[in-house]
Image (cartoon, rainbow, N blue to C red):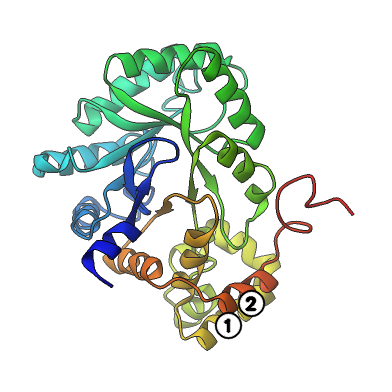
Amino acid sequence: MSAASSENQLYTRLGRTGLRVSRICLGTVNFGGRVVEPEARELLDYAVDSGINFVDTANMYGWREYKGYTEDVIGRWLASRPSLRDEVVLATKVGNPMSDGLNEQGLSARHIVSACEASLRRLGTDWIDLYQMHHVDRDVGWDEVWQAMELLVQQGKVRYVGSSNFAGWDLATAQEAARARHFLGVVSEQCLYNLAVRYPELELLPAARAYGVAVLPWSPLHGGLLSGVLRKSAEGCAVKSGQGRAAAALGTMRSTIEEYEQMCAEFGRDPAQVGLAWVMSRPGVTSTVIGPRTCAHIKDALQALDSPLSDEETARLEKLFPPVGHGGAAPDAWLT
């Protein structure tokens, strides 16, 4: 593959915006606790030096150390490589509780503005490229949310606004409210989406497509479930895949995962690369958020991007991990 074609494959526009981002986004949820600061900086260096220009975090990440720890780590990294700030598309989130304070959570105008200013201080930057609502807050009206976001955009502290963990109808109501205010609104949505979790195909992905919203799947390997968890467990090297989301799902999906790992062996491919390649190939997916603990995990993601699945491989995966109902968007997916 030529350098030009490889570059074209690595970058795309963020939804309906003119912003170009890498199709792999470096997620930082493991920074703090699972990844110590020197290792985190090594991951950041390796990612950007490999062409990944999209870095995602959240103000509450690093909670195993303290909430805000991960933004502090990224801020120190950026300070050590100041020329990168103009190259990196930096995303963070607001909404999850930052303390026990009554107003230190949610999407009130007060919290959005104060949390943004705190994130800017920790990140050591003048602006956030993508400021994402970590969860929908149905106790707050959209006029209040957009008033706060508009203020931050006007002040130059935020370039674009995104969402995370929204339902399809949340996207629709948010966008219609933004449209009434002549505001750009949501440009991206982070959602849980992988071979084992396909419900976003029912309503969220169609809504995102209708509104020109970029889709950024998180946990594309379902916490390690799709990364070869059974083989790793047998070898005694299952770290993240032996706990949390992956462990819970394995209880009901063991036979499917056994067949999946056998199928990947027949493909001659690593399970993690297969799971990532499937997510990256899905219609509407803009950039896949990975949460690496080692540089090898980033390398695997880049290889998955460079080695798309064949039609035969995709067909076998679709049979093993079928879509919800009849497949496609609601309501046709469940109509008889």
Is 253 on the left or on the right of 283, as rendered? right
Q: Indicate the amino acid at tag 1.
A: Met
Expressed as whole percent of the image width and height from the top left, the position of residue 321 reads 67, 67
- Of residues 243 and 116, the one drawn nearer to the viewer in this rendering: 116
Mark 2 lies on residue: 316
Q: Indicate the amino acid at tag 2.
A: Arg
Q: Are marks 2 and 1 in contact (CB under 8 Å)?
A: yes
Is 235 on the left or on the right of 10, as rendered? right
Q: Earlier in the sequence, mark 2 or mark 1?
A: 1
Let me know if residue 273 appears in the view.
yes
Q: Which mark is residue 181?
A: none
Identified at 54% across, 77% down, the residue is 230
Identified at 62% across, 79% down, the residue is 258
Let me know if residue 102 appears in the view.
no
In this rendering, the answer to whether 113 lies above or below 81 is: above
Asked which quadrant contains residue 126, the reply is top left
Q: How many C-alpha atoms fall within 10 Å of the one at disc 1: few (<14), some, or many (≥20)?
A: some
Q: How many C-alpha atoms fall within 10 Å of the one at disc 2: few (<14), some, or many (≥20)?
A: few
Mark 1 lies on residue: 263
Identified at 40% across, 73% down, the residue is 307
